[in-house]
Amino acid sequence: FAVIVGVKALIMGPRRSSSSSSAYQATPQRRNERRSTLTTDAFYGLGIAIILFASGTIVWSTRHLNRINIVSTSSISNSKAEFLGEDQFAKNDKLELQKEVPVLSLDDIPLPDSGDGAIIPFDLSVNFLQRIIKAPGAPPEPPMVAHASKARVEEDFLPVVPPSSVNFRWRHRARVGSSYEDASNIQGYRIIVRRHQHASIERSNNLTVWDSGRVDIDSAAGEELPHSVTWGSSPPTIGHILEWMVQVWDNNNQPNTSSWTKFAVGPEKEDDWKGKWIVHPHDMDTFDTTNKLHTKTKRFGDLKNDCKNWKKRRPLPLFRMKLSSEELNVIEGEEISSVLLVMSGLGSFRASFDGVPLSTSGPIDPPFTDYSKRIMYRGYDVTPFLLGSSSITSNHVIGVTMGSGWWDHRPVTGMAKFHFLPRGPVTVVAQIIVTYTSGETRVVGQSSENGMANWQVTRGHIRESDLFTGEMIDLNVFAAMEGWDTTNGWQDEAIGIDGTDPYMNIDAWVNPVSYRTEVTQAERKQEMAIRSSALHKNKTKYYPRRKQVASPLGQLVPSEIPPILPMERIAPDEIHDLGSGRWLLDFGRAFSGMLHFDKGLPQPIIPHNNIYPRAHGFGDASEKRWSFITVVYGESLEMTTGDINRVLVAG
């Protein structure tokens, strides 16, 4: 309305009284007055428009963002408090945002009684990594699984370092109320490293493995605190779970001590790994050009044949390993001090112990690297699962759920140049390092020829897991295989598998086979140079035709960055029923995350004409009239129908 007033003022000009209209003459002076009045009226109208628009926007935004308009049905929970947690949910049904949200939940800053010094050390890290106890957006505590001693692990991320390179870093701050002179300089520091023991284990003597002693810093001579402190004695033992602290002296020579923080020492060289990469037998056959399951190709990387072989590797496999009590208690008179599980998987993996997830990280774990050169692995402290007389004398099962990741995703064309990435069948490597009270270590449960009898693999509930086309899960298989990663679901005898249809091998557990390839690192390097036009074919070295064409695997290194962790739990602002079994969940912002239904899934609806909305169906569902649910992620809506206009990922 205000804009119309302003435009009307520009067109019609200023108002004049009837008495003066007849005497009005277009003199230069009157024309200037008229222009001035026109400008004033125009700005007056536009000013009103801006004020009304701003006021309306504020009112609408406030009401829209604070309104919880969730349609309550039997299948969709309308309780944000239950999902977000009572501590994050205000009484007035509004989400209270913390003024200071910690990036990661780390070890506590030392208490004031940890010393009398004016400088407090905190934020301890080893090799630039910090222990993450619990991610801020971690899901609620899962129910206790039968035969499990804990519902979750002690940390979401445990730093693992190689024995040849251990560097300590920390930050420090002034104590509240201390003087500037006392907190201005650090006169010295001391680092103590000892073997970590859980509270329920009787603490042994002589646990210290390195003590730097006090290292003085002569600030008057220009010496400064080093950026990092390197391990100064003989290298630590692989498999030990350690903890360290630092003590600093302020300018008045008064000490203060940090809290203890935990890390582990993992394998570094190839000889340190007793476990080897293992795969599903049929998955390895799809990369064997002499096998009947493999479609013979003219050259490696043919798109059409790669798609055919890719479909033969679906559904994705599940791995599991049985850890017997006899393997753990092999040294007479020795008690277990700690148990470290080191593991990696390509493309991506999630590990569990007796059905309990070992981390809330995912779904991209390990991080993306050139897998033919370097692959990162994770370490997990599974000692709490083995504490107590009943746990130490019982068998346990470690489960691994696999995804495609950047390793074996669907061959696609266009922007994603999949043929530049290393490719191979979904594979896993793992081993358990047991440390006894004497400090002696032993490797058990390794994924190798010697330990293959303890490992099993099968086709699971994930029919497809792709970074570009989404994930497809068979909920019927998921329900039927419940408990597959626990002792209740373990089967000692392997079941025979069908070599023609991979879907007939679901829940058919067999022993895995070793990963194998004839492609060398030098050959792959030359192949990539040719594909990227960095090397002419006339200058290449001749390599014979390979039978095993999977990519070579690189060196295993400890994870050099923290995993992708949930930072926040959010619930939809609005849920709209679009009809035909479609629901629109509006979270009010863009984010990267995983969808979680806390009280079951919506009821699926099959259209009578078998015509599904765009991006909501697929061929098998239409032909076989399957009951299924599709979650489509989008970033904009159609103005007319309110449906998703731009599909990012469908799965």
Image (cartoon, grey):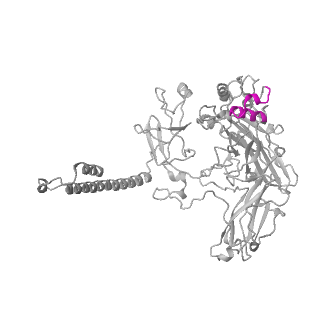
Could you say which quadrant of the image residue 37 lies in? bottom left
61 or 127: which is nearer to us?
127
Quarter holding the C terminus is: top right
Could you say which quadrant of the image residue 503 lies in? top right
Q: Which residues are magenta?
A: 522-544
Residue farthest to the front, as pictured: 28
Asked whether residue 532 is drawn in magenta, I would say yes
Left-right relation of 121 to 194: left
52 or 347: which is nearer to us?
52
Asked whether residue 454 is drawn in magenta, I would say no
At which x and y percent is residue 492? 77, 36
At which x and y percent is residue 403? 66, 38
68 or 237: which is nearer to us?
237
The residue under the point 68% across, 69% down is 120
**Is residue 198 at all visible to an observer of this figure?**
no
Q: Is residue 512 above or below residue 247?
A: above
Q: Is residue 247 above or below residue 139?
A: below
Q: Is residue 370 above or below residue 442?
A: above
Could you say which quadrant of the image residue 493 lies in? top right
At which x and y percent is residue 85? 55, 55
Left-right relation of 579 to 27: right
At which x and y percent is residue 600? 54, 42
Left-right relation of 636 to 468: left
**Is residue 285 at all visible to an observer of this figure?**
yes
Count up the numbered dots. Answer: 0
